[in-house]
Amino acid sequence: MTQEIQELEARLFEERLKELCRRAYNQGLDDARTNQSYPPMFKKEDVADYFQVSKASVENIIRMSGFPKSKIVNARYPRDEVIKWANASENIERVNLLKQAN
C-alpha cells in the first residue's frame, strides 16, 4: 500500500513537472516573439510602444540613470539592452511610477 502511494505521488509529481516545463517553454516562446518583433535599435516611438507610455514620457525614461543608449547613433537605443534594463526590478518600479504620474 505504501509503495502504491509513493508510485502515485511520483507520477503526480512527474505530470506536474511536465506541465510546468511546458508552460515555461511556451512563455519563453511568447516572450521571444514579442521582443524579437521590435527592431534591433529602438527609436523613441519603439520605446513608447514597448513601455506603453506617451512620447512625452519617453523623454523621462531615456533620462533615467543607466538607460541604455547607442554609442554610435543619436536617439537610438539597443533593444536587448533596453529590455534587460526594463526587467531590472528597480527600473520596473521607476517606470511604473512614471506611468501613474501621467
Image: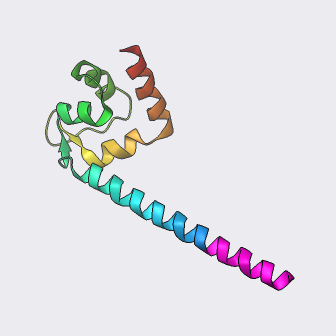
Identify the residue at the far front of this view.
1
Q: Is residue 90 left or right of 62 when viewed as pictured? A: right
Q: Main secondary structure of the magenta part?
A: helix
The question of residue 9 being in magenta is answered with yes
Residue in the picture at 34% in, 60% down: 29
In this view, 59 is above or below 75: above
**Residue 85: percent from the left, percent from the top?**
38, 41
> In the picture provided, is 79 more to the left or to the right than 9?
left
Residue 65, located in which quarter of the rendered image? top left
Q: Which residues are magenta?
A: 1-14
Q: Residue furthest left?
A: 73
Q: Residue at x 40, y 14 (%)?
A: 101
- Number of labels in the image equals 0
Q: In what quadrant of the picture does the C terminus appear?
A: top left
Which of the image's four quarters has the N terminus? Answer: bottom right
When the figure is inspected, residue 52 is found, relative to residue 80, above or below; the finding is above
Q: Is residue 21 magenta?
A: no
Write the residue at 48% across / 29% down. 93
> Is 10 drawn above or below residue 71 in the view shown?
below
Query: x, y percentage for residue 2?
Result: 86, 81
Residue 8 image position (x, y, % from top left): 72, 77
Query: Among all residues in the image, which is located at the extreme top?
Result: 101
| Residue for point 46% across, 66% down | 22
In terms of depth relative to the viewer, which is nearer, 44 or 25? 25
> Where in the figure is residue 14, as x and y percent of width and height?
62, 75
Which colour style is shown? rainbow
Q: Nearer the viewer, residue 4 or 79?
A: 4
